[in-house]
Image: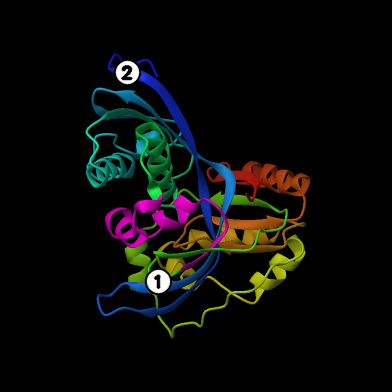
Amino acid sequence: MTRSDLIGPGVSEFAPAKLNLYLHVVGRRADGYHLLDSLVAFAEIGDSVSAAQAVNLSLEVGGPFKAQLSPDSEQNLVLRSARWLAERSGIADGAALALEKHLPVASGIGGGSSDAAATLRALARLWHCDLNRLDPADIAAALGADVPVCLINRAAWLGGIGEAVAPASPLPDCWVVLANPGVAVATPAVFKARRGEFSAPARFGAVADAVALAGALSRRRNDLTDAALSLAPEIGDVLSALAAEPAALIARMSGSGATCFALFAARGEAVAAATHLAAAHPRWWVAEGKLR
């Protein structure tokens, strides 16, 4: 950062892609919000947020997807999170925030929520405030249902509308390839388009390796897939292409789409699959990395 209002050193936080390894819709509250059961994991693929002491609160956005965000918008989750934390913690300090946007927007991998969580973690370090004193339900209501689990930043079980978060057993070593056809899908529209009965919760214990994890996931699903496909049929092409990769253990949509993922047992297999997909589909966003 080189802005003129900086008055102190900075900190940075990684904002990893959030993956719903499975996602069951188990009910709906009287206010219309859906109740979820999901195993959430994070990949070593993501954005980054940095913060430095400054006179005022400001945000700069860079990275390949910066054009999809407005740094001055009231809807920008980085600025909203900073203002919310300052108000809740009684802090009058400023901060110069910078977001490097590498994840596509509105893509089902929690990019905005992970950015918000990274902002909270960075500012907690910069402003010396305790995030443990914040109520996850308040965070979810103010900033979004995925923010509490992104704040934990490790494999976790997700319940309620997103505010009920519990750490999961450590995941085995495995790698993922993410692919997005370049289509933004609005989460509210996907939930509105969902049809059918509610599913049962389906949590499971620790698994030994990537093959066992894929086996456990194969007996579960993403209940939003059909609804997302009705709005963005391109998702079907992505799922088919991922599943066709020779070493792919399982292919699935994450969140409300349109990003999909495939699991692999070895890094070389994931790199080969990502290279092949990127060459075969140059308009898609494709990335590979290890599950954290």
- Compare residues 38 and 6 and report the one nearer the observer: 6
Instruction: State the SS at label 2.
Output: strand
CA gap, disc 2 to disc 1?
41 Å
Residue on which disc 1 sits:
160
- Compare residues 101 and 235 and report the one nearer the observer: 101
- Residue farthest along the bottom direction in this orientation: 197
Find out whether residue 139 is within the magenta segment: yes
Residue on which disc 2 sits:
6
- Left or right: 278 with respect to 172? left
- Which badge, 2 or 1, comes first in the chain's sequence? 2
Residue 105 visible, this angle: no
**Dot 1 alpha-carbon crowd within 10 angstroms: few under 14, some 14 to 19, many 20 or more:** many
Residue at 27% x, 55% y is 142
Disc 2 residue type? Answer: Leu
Residue 98: x and y in percent read 38, 29
- Please identify the quarter of the rendering in which residue 145 is found: bottom left
- Please identify the quarter of the rendering in which residue 264 is found: bottom right
Instruction: State the SS at label 1.
Output: loop
